[in-house]
Amino acid sequence: MEIFRTDRLALRELKASDADAIYQLNHDPGVIRYTSDGPFPTIDEARQFLLNYDAYRSYGYGRWAVIRIADNTFLGWCGLRFSPETGKTDIGFRFQKAFWGLGYATESARGCLEYGFTKLGLPEIVGRAMKVNIASIRVLQKVGMHYDRDFDFDGSEGVLYKIKPADFRA
Ligand SMILES: CC(C)(COP(=O)(O)OP(=O)(O)OC[C@H]1O[C@@H](n2cnc3c(N)ncnc32)[C@H](O)[C@@H]1OP(=O)(O)O)[C@@H](O)C(=O)NCCC(=O)NCCS
Protein backbone atom coordinates (compact mmCIF):
# COMPACT_ATOMS: atom_id res chain seq x y z
CA MET A 1 0.00 0.00 0.00
CA GLU A 2 1.39 3.41 -0.94
CA ILE A 3 1.66 5.86 1.97
CA PHE A 4 2.76 9.10 0.29
CA ARG A 5 4.83 10.58 -2.52
CA THR A 6 7.46 13.28 -2.65
CA ASP A 7 8.84 14.90 -5.83
CA ARG A 8 10.96 11.89 -6.78
CA LEU A 9 9.94 9.15 -4.38
CA ALA A 10 7.03 6.91 -3.44
CA LEU A 11 6.91 5.42 0.05
CA ARG A 12 4.92 2.23 0.36
CA GLU A 13 4.60 -0.60 2.85
CA LEU A 14 7.32 -3.23 2.76
CA LYS A 15 6.14 -6.61 1.52
CA ALA A 16 7.44 -10.18 1.28
CA SER A 17 8.47 -9.67 -2.34
CA ASP A 18 11.04 -7.07 -1.13
CA ALA A 19 13.02 -9.95 0.45
CA ASP A 20 15.72 -9.97 -2.22
CA ALA A 21 16.14 -6.19 -2.04
CA ILE A 22 16.42 -5.99 1.75
CA TYR A 23 18.71 -9.01 1.79
CA GLN A 24 21.01 -7.18 -0.65
CA LEU A 25 20.73 -3.97 1.37
CA ASN A 26 21.87 -5.56 4.66
CA HIS A 27 24.44 -7.68 2.83
CA ASP A 28 26.61 -4.59 2.22
CA PRO A 29 28.87 -4.12 5.29
CA GLY A 30 29.19 -0.40 4.45
CA VAL A 31 25.43 0.01 4.70
CA ILE A 32 24.93 -1.66 8.10
CA ARG A 33 28.23 -0.46 9.62
CA TYR A 34 26.67 2.19 11.87
CA THR A 35 23.46 0.30 12.64
CA SER A 36 22.75 -2.40 15.21
CA ASP A 37 21.63 -4.84 12.47
CA GLY A 38 23.52 -7.67 10.85
CA PRO A 39 23.04 -9.23 7.43
CA PHE A 40 20.19 -11.69 6.89
CA PRO A 41 21.72 -15.20 6.63
CA THR A 42 19.52 -16.04 3.63
CA ILE A 43 16.95 -14.41 1.36
CA ASP A 44 14.37 -16.69 2.93
CA GLU A 45 15.12 -15.26 6.39
CA ALA A 46 14.68 -11.78 4.96
CA ARG A 47 11.29 -12.94 3.62
CA GLN A 48 10.36 -14.36 7.05
CA PHE A 49 11.33 -11.06 8.66
CA LEU A 50 9.04 -9.19 6.25
CA LEU A 51 6.18 -11.67 6.76
CA ASN A 52 6.51 -11.20 10.54
CA TYR A 53 6.90 -7.42 10.39
CA ASP A 54 3.71 -6.28 12.13
CA ALA A 55 4.34 -2.57 12.81
CA TYR A 56 1.73 -1.43 10.26
CA ARG A 57 -0.95 -3.56 11.91
CA SER A 58 0.15 -2.86 15.48
CA TYR A 59 0.79 0.88 15.30
CA GLY A 60 -0.51 2.05 11.91
CA TYR A 61 2.95 2.95 10.61
CA GLY A 62 6.52 1.65 10.37
CA ARG A 63 9.52 1.60 8.10
CA TRP A 64 8.48 1.97 4.46
CA ALA A 65 10.06 1.00 1.14
CA VAL A 66 11.39 3.98 -0.80
CA ILE A 67 10.82 3.64 -4.53
CA ARG A 68 12.17 6.02 -7.15
CA ILE A 69 9.12 7.02 -9.15
CA ALA A 70 10.99 7.58 -12.45
CA ASP A 71 12.06 3.95 -12.87
CA ASN A 72 10.41 2.05 -10.00
CA THR A 73 13.79 1.27 -8.39
CA PHE A 74 13.83 0.06 -4.77
CA LEU A 75 16.32 2.47 -3.18
CA GLY A 76 16.03 1.36 0.43
CA TRP A 77 13.76 2.21 3.32
CA CYS A 78 12.78 5.17 5.44
CA GLY A 79 10.08 5.51 8.02
CA LEU A 80 8.72 5.93 11.49
CA ARG A 81 9.04 3.35 14.22
CA PHE A 82 7.02 3.32 17.40
CA SER A 83 8.80 1.90 20.43
CA PRO A 84 6.36 0.47 22.98
CA GLU A 85 9.19 0.52 25.56
CA THR A 86 9.78 4.27 25.37
CA GLY A 87 6.46 5.39 23.88
CA LYS A 88 8.48 7.39 21.34
CA THR A 89 8.48 7.35 17.55
CA ASP A 90 11.80 7.51 15.76
CA ILE A 91 12.75 8.20 12.17
CA GLY A 92 15.18 5.92 10.38
CA PHE A 93 16.59 5.44 6.89
CA ARG A 94 18.80 3.04 5.00
CA PHE A 95 19.65 3.17 1.30
CA GLN A 96 21.71 1.12 -1.14
CA LYS A 97 25.14 2.67 -1.46
CA ALA A 98 24.69 3.32 -5.19
CA PHE A 99 22.02 5.87 -4.27
CA TRP A 100 23.80 7.78 -1.50
CA GLY A 101 24.49 11.47 -1.84
CA LEU A 102 21.50 12.22 -4.07
CA GLY A 103 19.31 13.73 -1.38
CA TYR A 104 16.98 10.73 -1.19
CA ALA A 105 17.31 10.28 2.60
CA THR A 106 16.59 13.95 3.22
CA GLU A 107 13.63 13.97 0.82
CA SER A 108 12.05 10.82 2.22
CA ALA A 109 12.74 11.74 5.86
CA ARG A 110 11.14 15.15 5.37
CA GLY A 111 8.10 13.41 3.89
CA CYS A 112 7.95 11.08 6.89
CA LEU A 113 8.04 13.97 9.35
CA GLU A 114 5.26 15.72 7.46
CA TYR A 115 3.20 12.53 7.39
CA GLY A 116 3.92 11.85 11.08
CA PHE A 117 2.84 15.30 12.17
CA THR A 118 -0.05 16.06 9.80
CA LYS A 119 -1.59 12.61 9.21
CA LEU A 120 -0.64 10.72 12.38
CA GLY A 121 -0.71 13.66 14.77
CA LEU A 122 2.49 12.62 16.53
CA PRO A 123 3.59 15.03 19.28
CA GLU A 124 7.32 14.48 18.67
CA ILE A 125 9.68 12.45 16.48
CA VAL A 126 13.19 11.47 17.57
CA GLY A 127 16.23 10.38 15.55
CA ARG A 128 19.20 8.36 16.76
CA ALA A 129 22.61 7.96 15.15
CA MET A 130 26.10 6.91 16.08
CA LYS A 131 28.34 9.93 16.52
CA VAL A 132 30.58 8.69 13.71
CA ASN A 133 27.65 8.45 11.28
CA ILE A 134 28.08 11.95 9.87
CA ALA A 135 25.78 11.41 6.87
CA SER A 136 22.91 10.26 9.07
CA ILE A 137 23.36 13.15 11.53
CA ARG A 138 23.49 15.56 8.59
CA VAL A 139 20.13 14.24 7.35
CA LEU A 140 18.59 14.66 10.82
CA GLN A 141 19.85 18.26 10.88
CA LYS A 142 18.72 19.02 7.32
CA VAL A 143 15.14 18.01 8.09
CA GLY A 144 15.13 20.43 11.02
CA MET A 145 15.75 18.14 13.99
CA HIS A 146 17.59 19.46 17.04
CA TYR A 147 20.33 17.80 19.07
CA ASP A 148 18.94 16.70 22.43
CA ARG A 149 21.59 14.58 24.16
CA ASP A 150 24.20 11.85 23.88
CA PHE A 151 23.22 8.27 24.62
CA ASP A 152 24.62 4.76 24.50
CA PHE A 153 23.99 3.31 21.03
CA ASP A 154 24.58 -0.40 21.67
CA GLY A 155 28.01 0.31 23.16
CA SER A 156 28.91 3.14 20.77
CA GLU A 157 28.56 6.87 21.36
CA GLY A 158 25.20 7.98 20.02
CA VAL A 159 23.37 11.27 19.56
CA LEU A 160 19.67 11.80 19.98
CA TYR A 161 17.87 14.39 17.86
CA LYS A 162 14.25 15.56 18.26
CA ILE A 163 11.60 17.63 16.55
CA LYS A 164 8.11 18.78 17.48
CA PRO A 165 5.37 19.72 14.99
CA ALA A 166 5.72 23.46 15.68
CA ASP A 167 9.36 23.36 14.55
CA PHE A 168 8.71 21.45 11.33
CA ARG A 169 8.71 23.20 7.95
CA ALA A 170 7.86 20.98 4.97
C1 LIG B 1 22.63 7.88 6.12
C2 LIG B 1 22.06 7.72 4.70
C3 LIG B 1 20.65 7.19 4.78
C4 LIG B 1 22.10 9.07 3.98
O1 LIG B 1 21.45 8.91 2.73
P1 LIG B 1 21.65 9.93 1.51
O2 LIG B 1 20.51 9.74 0.58
O3 LIG B 1 23.02 9.79 0.98
O4 LIG B 1 21.51 11.33 2.26
P2 LIG B 1 21.33 12.76 1.60
O5 LIG B 1 21.93 12.73 0.22
O6 LIG B 1 19.91 13.16 1.71
O7 LIG B 1 22.18 13.70 2.58
C5 LIG B 1 23.43 13.29 3.08
C6 LIG B 1 24.14 14.48 3.67
O8 LIG B 1 25.26 14.02 4.42
C7 LIG B 1 26.45 14.60 3.87
N1 LIG B 1 27.52 13.64 4.05
C8 LIG B 1 27.53 12.36 3.65
N2 LIG B 1 28.69 11.77 4.02
C9 LIG B 1 29.40 12.71 4.69
C10 LIG B 1 30.66 12.72 5.34
N3 LIG B 1 31.42 11.62 5.38
N4 LIG B 1 31.08 13.86 5.93
C11 LIG B 1 30.30 14.99 5.90
N5 LIG B 1 29.07 15.03 5.31
C12 LIG B 1 28.65 13.90 4.71
C13 LIG B 1 26.10 14.89 2.43
O9 LIG B 1 26.98 15.84 1.88
C14 LIG B 1 24.68 15.42 2.60
O10 LIG B 1 24.64 16.71 3.16
P3 LIG B 1 24.55 18.06 2.27
O11 LIG B 1 23.28 17.96 1.46
O12 LIG B 1 24.54 19.14 3.26
O13 LIG B 1 25.76 18.05 1.37
C15 LIG B 1 22.92 6.72 3.87
O14 LIG B 1 24.26 7.11 3.94
C16 LIG B 1 22.78 5.30 4.36
O15 LIG B 1 21.91 4.56 3.94
N6 LIG B 1 23.69 4.88 5.28
C17 LIG B 1 23.69 3.53 5.80
C18 LIG B 1 22.55 3.28 6.76
C19 LIG B 1 22.59 4.19 7.97
O16 LIG B 1 23.64 4.41 8.55
N7 LIG B 1 21.42 4.70 8.33
C20 LIG B 1 21.26 5.59 9.46
C21 LIG B 1 21.34 4.86 10.73
S1 LIG B 1 21.06 5.93 12.14
Image (spheres, rainbow, N blue to C red):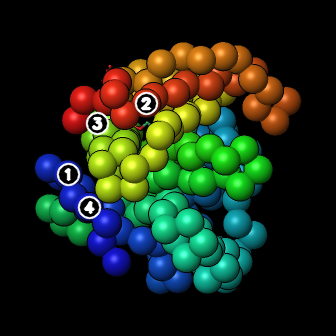
Please say if the residues under marks 2 and 3 sit with CB atoms less than 8 Å apart: no
List the residue tagged with mark 4.
Answer: 4
Q: On the image, which quarter does residue 69 sit in?
A: bottom left
Q: Is mark 3 within 8 Å of ligand 1?
A: yes
Question: Residue 80 vs residue 100: left or right?
Answer: right
In whole angstroms, how far apart are the C-alphas of marks 4 and 3? Answer: 17 Å
Q: Is mark 1 within 8 Å of ligand 1?
A: no
Residue 134, horizontal then vertical, whole percent? 52, 21
Residue closer to the observer: 83 or 141:
83
List the residue tagged with mark 2.
Answer: 164
Residue beneath the point at 81% across and 36% down? 154
List the residue tagged with mark 3.
Answer: 103
Ligand 1's quadrant: top left
Query: What is the three-letter code of the residue carrying label 3?
Result: Gly
Mark 4 and mark 3 lie on one chain; the one further toward the N terminus is 4
Query: In the image, which is nearer the foreground, mark 2 or mark 3?
Result: 2
List the residue tagged with mark 1.
Answer: 6
Mark 2 and mark 4 lie on one chain; the one further toward the N terminus is 4
